[in-house]
Image (tube, helix red, strand yellow):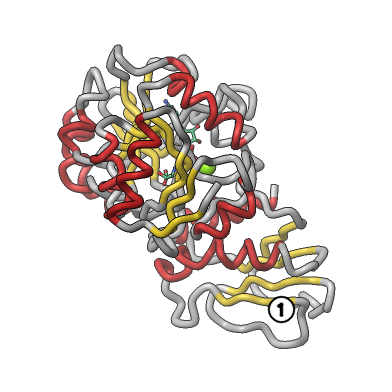
Amino acid sequence: MPVIKATTKNIRKAAALLREGGVVAFPTETVYGLGADGTDPGACARIFEIKGRPRFDPLILHECSAARAGKLFSRVPAPARRLMRRFWPGPLTLVLPKSAAIPDIVTSGLRTVAVRVPANPVARALIKAAGRPVAAPSANRFGRLSPTTAAHVRRQLGEGPDLILDGGRTSIGVESTIITFRSGRPVLLRPGGLPLEDIEAVAGKASAPEPGGDKNPAAPGCLKKHYAPKVRLRIIAGPEGIKPSRRAAYLAFSKRPAGRWKASAVLSPSGDLREAAASLFAALHRLERCGAAVIYAERVPARGLGRAIMDRLKRASA
Ligand code: TXA
Ligand code: MG
């Protein structure tokens, strides 16, 4: 499982591997994906094996243009069409009725499919050269922290993928926002890299999915406990009342905590939620490896990308 730089030549090599049924990890603007030919059920099956992901949790199909992506759906409501025009390529995934050609393993047998057009130039070049939709979940072990660098992928998936394309650190740092539609109205399945405010300005007010619980969740992969670091994580309002300890780690939003900690990280010294999202997973990867027994993580404002950050922290603490 070589890690290779995402040069033009290596992207071509990775695309050839995908066409032969191989599994390739690659950067997107959100997190690294673990990709396979989305028209090849055998190749998609390998994604589930490598991730240790249950088969009921469907994959996202990635396309290199909105025109090609639109063909993967059998029906697109008008507000979804507007979102596609406005935000693709970008960190938005749409879940809509699937076209007949998509294999069942991609959608876990559902009648809908999740599709997005990534903005990262390596991802787009790879998908274009592969000449087919690329199925790709985040390139982590199931339920663990998402990868924002090639090193994160390698540490979790080891010899699993046939190739890891190293395109540097991802720019957005949290997964895409997932939107579906009910009766023509948007429903937020997962807060992510595209702020909900931007989506609502184009498609109208979004609702929360009907609660199905962990047995029958609206988004099958959105289990309560997910994105979990290996050590316990506790969400706190701030440093007040928390005693510094050499056995604990501290994840701050904007201000370095006083006192001596096993390790600490500041997500954004200027208090910028975009910057905080971009550094979130790298900080959590580092803190989970520092040997602390617990990570204290500060709340961030729940607006813009703060919604996605709080969502990931809550799942990590569940
Ligand atoms: O930013 C991202 O979205 C990254 C990059 C690699 O594109 N991908 C990603 O994939 O986060 P994954 O598989 O880790 O998360 C996709 C989520 C899962 O929770 C899955 O259950 C949900 O999308 N999903 C996929 N198809 C669905 C469908 N038809 N209906 C509802 N949820 C679906
Ligand atoms: Mg994931």
* Residue 309 rendering spot, x and y as whole percentages: 51, 58
* Residue 21 rendering spot, x and y as whole percentages: 43, 28
* Residue 283 rendering spot, x and y as whole percentages: 59, 67
Q: Is residue 225 left or right of residue 24?
A: right
The total number of labels drawn is 1
Q: Would you name the residue on which mark 1 appears?
A: 240
The residue located at (51%, 57%) in the rendering is 150
Position above or below: 189 against 313: above
- Nearer the observer, 283 or 148: 148
The residue located at (28%, 54%) in the rendering is 8
Let me know if residue 126 appears in the view: yes
Q: Quadrant of residue 155?
A: bottom right
Let me know if residue 315 appears in the view: no
Q: Is residue 200 left or right of residue 173?
A: left
Position above or below: 239 against 105: below
Q: Quadrant of residue 275?
A: bottom left
Position above or below: 59 against 285: above
The residue located at (84%, 72%) in the rendering is 247
* Residue 96 rendering spot, x and y as whole percentages: 32, 25
- Secondary element at tag 1: loop
Q: Residue furthest top?
A: 100
Q: Residues within 10 Å of mark 1 (few under 14, many from 20)?
A: few
The residue located at (40%, 67%) in the rendering is 274
Q: Specify the amino acid type for callout 1.
A: Glu
